[in-house]
Amino acid sequence: LARESMASLEAVFPASMLALVVLGFFQSIVAYSGTFVANYHGAGDLRRAVSCYRIGTVLAFLFGALSFLFIPAGWWIFEQVVSGEEVVGRGCSYYSICTAGGVFLYGQMAVQSFFTGRGKTRAVFFVSLLGNVVNIALDPVLIFGWFSLPAMGISGAAYATVISLSLQWLILAAMARADIAKDEMHRFIVSAEQVDVIVHGTQFNIRSYESNSEVEVMLLEGSIDMQTKSLKENRVVRM
């Protein structure tokens, strides 16, 4: 940015800090979904862990919309603490683009928390590394207008960050989708005399004896489905 303009260099630091304050608040709330993912993963309940991940994604979209409300307030704050019309204009541009793209940061954090909450940090590390490489590579391309692209200056640096975050979100979301589908295909079923117990990752006791027509299932933690084997009545009961 210093090669493009000293005004851009002066503007990028306060603008990025202001964006970090606004986005960081919502990001931390979305990241907390990872705590619940870890809790249910530790209990062996994948279904509820996935539900927490999906709630985090819904919050990401909600907070992404709310972030737009903070753009005008950010302009006013920037004008109060930064001097120089050119620096203020460039800083507001950078801040606006980053804040408007906050949904990608929140979405990436939601799916990242789904992986880290289950101890799968390697995927997060390599995708984050790829995202940073893409960000670094796009910076000069968008700032200076390489390969016949328009020179966007400090706005190009902001767009590079947003594109990097969106790429990370898409890759991790695709990996999470495949991970969830794989786990749902390999269900654990305990077959008793009259019922099948479909396990969703949980703790339970089952008692079934040939001398007794009753089957006793005691759920300790998590959730299960009980499916009867009777030809006359085939019911599924979720516990």
Image: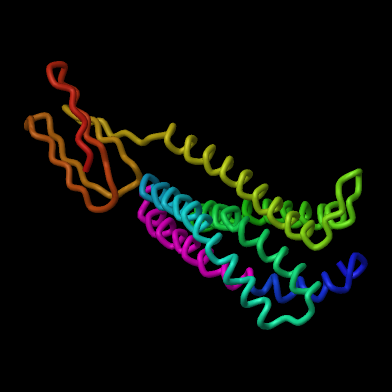
Quarter of the image where the C terminus is located: top left
Does residue 46 show up?
A: yes
Could you say where residue 110 lies in the image, as x and y percent from the top left?
51, 55
- The residue that appears at 29% across and 35% down in the rendered structure is 198
Does residue 119 show up?
A: no
96 in relation to 41, above or below? below
Query: 147 left or right of 193?
Result: right
The image's colour scheme reads rainbow
- Total marks placed: 0
Query: 70 left or right of 45?
Result: right
Q: Nearer the viewer, residue 84 or 70?
A: 84
Find residue 24 and report its image quarter.
bottom right
Query: 181 left or right of 141?
Result: left
Give the main secondary structure, helix, strand or loop, of the magenta stretch: helix
Quarter of the image where the N terminus is located: bottom right
Could you say where residue 233 lies in the image, as x and y percent from the top left?
13, 21
Could you say where residue 236 lies in the image, as x and y percent from the top left?
21, 31
- The residue that appears at 59% across and 58% down in the rendered structure is 102
Q: Nearer the viewer, residue 212 or 215?
A: 215
Q: Nearer the viewer, residue 196 or 87?
A: 87
- The residue that appears at 62% across and 75% down in the rendered structure is 76
217 in relation to 6, above or below? above
Residue furthest out toward the front: 85
Find residue 11 and report its image quarter.
bottom right
The magenta stretch is: 19-45
Find residue 229 and report its image quarter.
top left
Could you say where residue 122 lies in the image, as x and y percent from the top left?
63, 54
113 in relation to 169, above or below? below
Q: Nearer the viewer, residue 24 or 200?
A: 24
| Magenta highlight on residue 233 | no
